[in-house]
Image (spheres, rainbow, N blue to C red):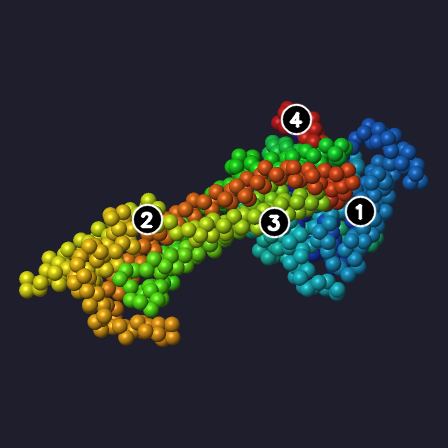
Amino acid sequence: MEALIPVVNKLQDVFNTVGTDIIQLPQIVVVGTQSSGKSSVLESLVGRDVLPRGTGIVTRRPLILQLVHIDPEDRRKSSEENATESKKNGRLYRGIDGEEWGKFLHTKNKIYTDFEEIRQEIEAETQRISGNNKGISNEPIHLRIFSPHVVNLTLVDLPGITKVPVGDQPKDIELQIRELIFKYIFNPNSIILAVTAANTDMATSEALKVAREVDPDGRRTLAVVTKLDLMDAGTDAMDVLMGRVIPVKLGLIGVVNRSQLDINQKKLVADAIRDEYAFLQKKYPSLANRNGTKYLARTLNRLLMHHIRDCLPDLKTRINVLASQYQSLLNSYGEPVEDKSSTLLQLITKFAAEYCHTIEGTAKYIETTELCGGARICYIFHETFGRTLESVDPLGGLTTIDVLTAIRNATGPRPALFVPEVSFELLVKRQVKRLEDPSLRCVELVHEEMQRIIQHCSNYSTQELLRFPKLHDAIVEVVTSLLRKRLPVTNEMVHNLVAIELAYINTKHPDFADACGLMNNNIEEQRRNRMRDLPSAVPRDKAAASGAQSGAASEQTDGGTGNWRGMLKKGEDGPATDRAMLQAPLHANPHKGYAVNLLDVPVPVSRKLSSREQRDCEVIERLIKSYFLIVRKNIQDSVPKAVMHFLVNHVKDCLQSELVGQLYKTGLLDDLLTESEDMAQRRNEAADMLKALQKASQVIAEIRETHLW
């Protein structure tokens, strides 16, 4: 399993080249308060003075430290491979200088054999990004150490947790550091190394508190207790190291760090480890074998290997899934254009086909959140437009007084024996005219939907257009212009449909004749009922005259043809005395004073209408309603047909020829097929990521299953 940690290091290098955290790799994250000894622990693991040291906040950027164990044979091989590079750096590997070396990711292939140079480079790189004002940055520094004295490990050193801003630090420095720490420890594949000083109370450990927030079960938390030699006299860390104070599942390991005086006096790490072993044997003899820097290194190495082994199957699956996704993404971005003429014609044809398919409902990408294309046009015709027409009241805007006034104005100076035809035509045209606005609104809604189809095709159906923003804009302009040209033509046709209905009021329409016949039968039945209810003392001829007078205009038919304008039945054939009897009550009408000066004096609304006036108005209203329903039915049927013929179908038939005629020109090829910089950049990024994922997949594939157990 020793091969697993180098594999993860390779994966880390692969993904560092594309600068992304898309894959959560197994690693050890060092967490602790400021000056708790985190960097000292890491230096003990490395065995060399490699990290910046001092008081206050020193680690201000994440440091991803990869320790690579090499044996002498590998060292000689590496030395031969890097001989040329080392000569450039002015030194050869001799003795201890050639045993250990380091490399930074940001300095490419430069080899550092002087660890003082490595420390200075870390300080310089930190200041380059984070500045000199004690601020922090979340951009990591990648350092790899090759040495025969280390075990294979991958660690992340993070800034220490602070509470109070110091110097020029921002006021939210505590929040910034917490967010940076959580960014790394939220990774479920990471092991948390919680560092706490022994001379503080474990119950107040910020490192353990932060670790417990993301790992409440403690399954991936290892606690390290530093500064065992600095505890108050008379106290020891026995209970803490035994796990009696705060139990941690992966264990607690105590270490002794070098003091600042030791660092200033250049005390070697090897000497410090030897002194640490002596201290543990003297102070904690029963626990000496389970504490100390060497035991910590072996434990971390074992934990990381087992952790990698557990994570590797999921990691392999994740890499394969991402590779497939990025391959699809790269395919959607398309290849660089070679034959521009062919590409332009292909894109135009594809857009026109997708536009027509969206209208017909056969598009490849079907919207599931809302109606679009042909389905929405159908909804506009039969739901929006149909319901709007049905909501139009046939007698809306007409009062009984309006009807009566129209009847009287149509009779002129002479009292009428029947309801004048002109009043019906005048009023019914006024009502039919109200159907024009909903019809024009229907055209407008369909036009808007056909505009929306352009965007739908651009977003879902022809993503290649997004590569060429100028071509996309040109296609949108051509289609919009075509729709704009067809809109007045369609509006004119719809206007004509209503004008046709207004041009000739066909009272011989079969449906209208049937409605009139039924209405006349009802009125005749009412007259007979009134005649039947008259007292026996009333002469029959007078009753007939009275009945004829009251229903003079509404109850008669012309020879049974259903014509509501027929004369009174006995007015033509009866003797002159009967006609005189019929006309006499008209001259004796007590309400005749209201019939004069109608143009100058409005008829009072509150006046009670006579029975004849009521019947006249009722006849006109029924006729208007009957004829209006016939016209509304015609309009409801003919307007969608007109819109489909003059707008929708015409655009479908002419779209491709219009696009080719406007855009397929030699002079426009280069301009229209200019690719957006954003698209080219995204294609390059996707290609780099795909390459990294494929390389990562190869790295994992090199591990045989037998290596995992």
Q: Which residue is mark 4?
A: 707
Q: Give residue 484's mark.
A: 3
Is the C terminus in the top left, top right, bottom left or bottom right quadrant? top right
Mark pair 1, 4: CA separation:
33 Å
- Determine whether, in the image, residue 210 is placed left or right of residue 625: right
Alpha carbons under labels 3 and 2: distance apart: 39 Å
Q: Amino acid at mark 2?
A: Phe
Image position of 618 (left or right of 575) = right
Nearer to us of marks 1 and 2 is: 2
Please tell me how many numbered marks the rendered image carries: 4
Report the front residue among 268 and 109.
109
Comparing labels 4 and 2, the label whose residue is closer to the camera: 2
User: N-terminal of the two: label 3 or label 4?
Assistant: 3
Q: Helix or strand or loop: what does disc 4 sit on? A: helix
Q: From the top left corner, tell me how far across and down residue 66 is, in percent.
A: 74, 40
Q: Is residue 466 visible?
A: no
Q: Amino acid at mark 3?
A: Arg
Residue in front for this viewpoint, 596 or 647? 596
Disc 2 target residue: 512
Residue 428 is drawn in which quadrant? bottom left
Pick whichever of labels 1 and 4 is earlier in the sequence: 1
Residue 150, numbered circle: none
Look at the numbered discs 4 and 2 and tell me whether their residues touch, using CB distance below 8 Å: no
**Closer to the N terminus: mark 3 or mark 1?**
1
Q: CA distance from mark 3 to mark 4?
A: 70 Å
Instruction: Write down the residue under mark 1.
Output: 50
- Please say if 395 is above or below 17: below
Q: Position of residue 383 (x, y in %)?
A: 43, 47
- Give whichever of discs 1 and 2 has the lower sequence position: 1
Element marked by disc 2: helix
